[in-house]
Image (spheres, grey):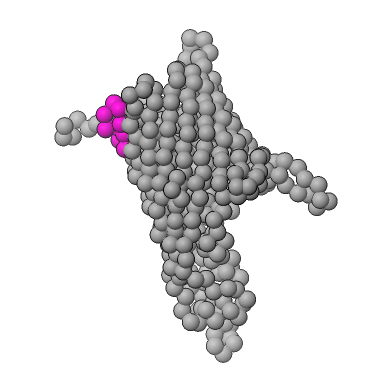
Amino acid sequence: MKGFFFYFFIFVSSNAFSQKYSNEFLAIGVGADAYGMGNAVVASADGVSAAYWNPAGLVGVKSWLEASVMHSEFFAGIAKYDYVGLAHAINDRSAISFSFIRFGVDDIPNTTQLIDNNGVVNYDNITKFNAGDYAFLGSYASKLKVEGMSIGGSVKVIYRKVGDFAKAWGFGLDAGWKYQRNKSWTFGIVARDVTSTFNAWVFNLDPEMQQVFLATGNEIPSNGLELTLPRVIFASACQFDLGKKGLKLGAELDLDVTTDGKRNTLISAAPFSIDPHLGIQFGFRDIVKLRGGISSIQSFSRIDGSSYWGVQPNLGLGIGIKGFHLDYAFTRLGDANANFYTHIFSIKLKLAKPKNAMK
């Protein structure tokens, strides 16, 4: 029975009706190339994944269709995180994109009816359910009259479901701005949940389950509204050619400013906290890229009461062959103090317009 309440409250009670850390699955990130950079890509993102990082960067999509997929796992494979993105260049000044994200735990044992009305343990009463968070993003970007400047936006529809017990629908908006000053310097700003994103929760607990909640000392959840407050990310990226042999060196610094109160970040205050991300990239043309980055700078406490700072290290490798790109990242997912690492892969395809397609 403890297993059911553990997962139920992870997906609902610990997030629903809490302004802080609401919809945190949308802060995980997409693309192994971004993970390798410590998620410091808001200024430099210019492909299909820009729909997530900074929709203004979608103007960098030059192909008829650009697609990207990623799969990663949390907690020794218990939770799975998946991403699919599609982007299309409308013309040389604008592009559109559709993205799908899922974070979920499948086959969770429901042990609330393990003990029947006669007090007998009956394992046949154990059923299973899935808990998942889903996000659908529709994005658009366009160049402005100012050379090198673009804007973009994303409409987000969120669906969260915990078996047959609870579900929520949400809606939100992201807005982005990007300015490529020259070949070396690029700046970006993205405002996520710019108008605050809401999730409307509806619970469906039958009388027997409500009795189990009360008997085990758990509060019965009620329908309500969950809000995700805005966050703004300021980014600056640079890239320089190393000689004339196609060698390039790039770096980016992002400052993630949250507005939902004091967080465990490098600069922690109320109502604003600032979490910096730093990434570097060394590459040979678009064929091979080596990446590194740091993120999630947090303070941790020891048993003796002293504290120390921990960071999330990130390493990455990218290989590109014509329109095919394979990216790999070696990083921690989540806690900067976690003692386990994970491998993340993502694939990106750039497809030309089919010859037999209608003009």
Q: Quadrant of residue 214?
A: bottom right
Q: Nearer the viewer, residue 193 or 307?
A: 193
Would you say 95 lies left or right of 175 here? Answer: left
Q: Is residue 291 above or below residue 85?
A: above
Whether 4 is drawn above or below 211: the answer is above
Q: Is residue 315 visible?
A: no
Q: Quadrant of residue 308?
A: top right
Residue drawn at x 44%, y 52% is 197
Q: Residue furthest top?
A: 244
> Horizontal and vertical percent for residue 28?
52, 45
Q: Main secondary structure of the magenta part?
A: strand
Residue depicted at 43% across the width and 68% down the height: 202
Q: Is residue 129 left or right of residue 255?
A: left
Position of residue 209 relative to residue 99, above or below, is below
- What is the residue that sits farthest to the right in this orientation? 304
Q: Residue at x 56, y 39 (%)?
A: 256
Tell me the residue at 60%/36% (across/down): 276
The location of residue 137, given as percent across then percent down, is: 37, 46
Location of residue 91 in the rendering, given as x and y in whole percent from the top left corner: 26, 29
Residue 133 visible within the image: yes
Please tell me which residue lies in front, 219 or 246: 219
Q: Is residue 145 magenta?
A: no
Residue 90 in magenta stretch: yes
Extent of the magenta region: 86-96
In this orientation, which residue lies closer to the viewer: 201 or 293? Answer: 201
Q: Quadrant of the N terminus?
A: bottom right
Viewport quadrant of the C terminus: top left
Position in image of residue 83 (x %, y %)? 43, 46
Looking at the image, which residue sits at the far bottom?
118
